[in-house]
Image (cartoon, helix red, strand yellow):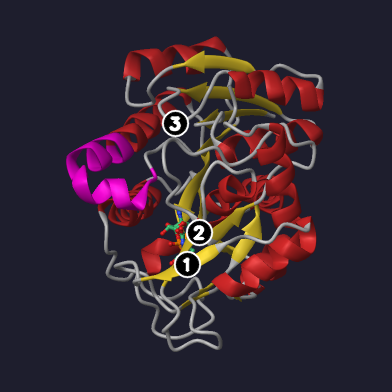
Amino acid sequence: MNILVTGGLGFIGSHTVVELLSAGHTPIIVDNLVNSKLEVLNRIQKITGVRPAFTELDVADEAALDKVFEKQPIDAVIHFAGLKAVGESVGKPLEYYSNNLCSTLTLLRCMKKHGTKNLIFSSSATVYGVPPSLPIKEEFPLGETTNPYGTSKAMIERILTDFSKANPDFNIALLRYFNPIGAHASGELGEDPNGIPNNLMPYITQVAVGRRDHLTVFGDDYETPDGTCVRDYIHVVDLAIGHVMTLKKLMENPGLVIYNLGTGKGSSVFEVLAAFEKGTGVKIPYVVGPRRAGDLPFLYANCDKAYKELGYKATRTVEDACRDAYAFQKKNPNGIQ
Ligand code: WQD
């Protein structure tokens, strides 16, 4: 099938394009390169032998996006495109809301106009806010999000829910990612954030290759087994495979569905550091600093629904992700150039 992948040169998007190709689909990538690089297209070609169609555009640019829909029939869309840095979003609410919401509204208008009725949306566990209990289930209500990034994801879920009610012939899946980490085993694709990494794994790998002096652990005085926060880290390749499996289900399942994509297992920061050392042989120097505002002690998924309805289960371990993330960073010490 022809699958339009918005943000398809990004971290999760590019790994998903690789899995779509290996499943025999035809991905068509659009990306505005605000947080990705054209070189990623060469890396996808190097891994798969296929150079997917690519158009540089902003998804909010309706005329440009319309041309892509005119060019060939689009069977489904996987919508990754969006600004996603939690910390940055606090200082740039207007940019985050207009970019993330307008691009989605524009995409929906184009899909309706051209009769494309299948959509997978890249959502986030952030929409749960402070969960009422653990592990987190899909039926939990949307929570109090604490930053414009997370709120924009929750708003888009609301938009898609209302859109689905008004358009029952559309098939929509909201995929709520927990903590994506790792890289493609080839070392050609991986997490390559601009500037100082907000997230744990890219910071660790940049320390491992000597780009950063040490890791600061944001607090070791939480009510958790070792005092550091616990998260559900899912290998990005497992996450990508989850999208391909959702695609299959989408066609059989009119209406709107929601799935957690995680492992169902929580790991603390110290456990990630131990897994990194075990998987790579590299010991990461760290200092314990103050807690980071907004961090919750525990966040991990109940993944029963994706397993029951999609037959989906993440198989790669945190150690696998550490090894793959390090291999990518070693091959690309200064990121993808
Ligand atoms: C994980 C743990 C930190 C960096 C975020 C977004 C979420 C999703 C995934 C998009 C926490 C600790 C981190 C560091 C540290 N993104 N840490 N030192 O905050 O769970 O989730 O990324 O959808 O929306 O909120 O991930 O990797 O930032 O932090 O100690 O330098 O690592 O305190 O406990 P988080 P993270």
To which residue does mark 3 refer?
35
Give the amino acid type for the residue marked by disc 2 in the picture: Leu
- For ligand 1, tell me if the residue under mark 2 lies within 8 Å: yes
What's the mark number on residue 215?
A: 2
The residue depicted at 34 percent of the width and 71 percent of the height is 290
Residue 267 picture location, percent across and down: 61, 74
Image height check: is 115 above or below 328?
above
**Most common secondary structure along the magenta stretch:** helix
- The mark that comes first in sequence, 1 or 3, is 3
Residue 308 picture location, percent across and down: 70, 70
Q: Are marks 3 and 2 in contact (CB under 8 Å)?
A: no
Residue 214 picture location, percent across and down: 52, 56
State the CA–CA distance, disc 1 to disc 2. 6 Å
Q: Is residue 319 rendered to the left or right of residue 215?
A: right
| Circle 1 residues within 10 Å: few <14, some 14–19, many ≥20 | few
Magenta segment, which residues?
A: 84-101
Question: Which SS class for mark 1?
Answer: strand
Residue 316 in view of the camera: no
The residue depicted at 35 percent of the width and 47 percent of the height is 163
Give the amino acid type for the residue marked by disc 3 in the picture: Asn
| Circle 2 residues within 10 Å: few <14, some 14–19, many ≥20 | many
Give the amino acid type for the residue marked by disc 1 in the picture: Val
- The mark that comes first in sequence, 1 or 2, is 2
Q: Do the residues labelled 1 and 2 touch (CB within 8 Å)?
A: yes
Query: In the rendered picture of this protein, how many numbered marks are placed on residues?
Result: 3
Residue 61 in view of the camera: yes
State the CA–CA distance, disc 3 to disc 2. 23 Å
- For ligand 1, tell me if the residue under mark 3 lies within 8 Å: no
Question: Which SS class for mark 3?
Answer: loop
Mark in the foreground, 1 or 3 = 1
To which residue does mark 1 refer?
287
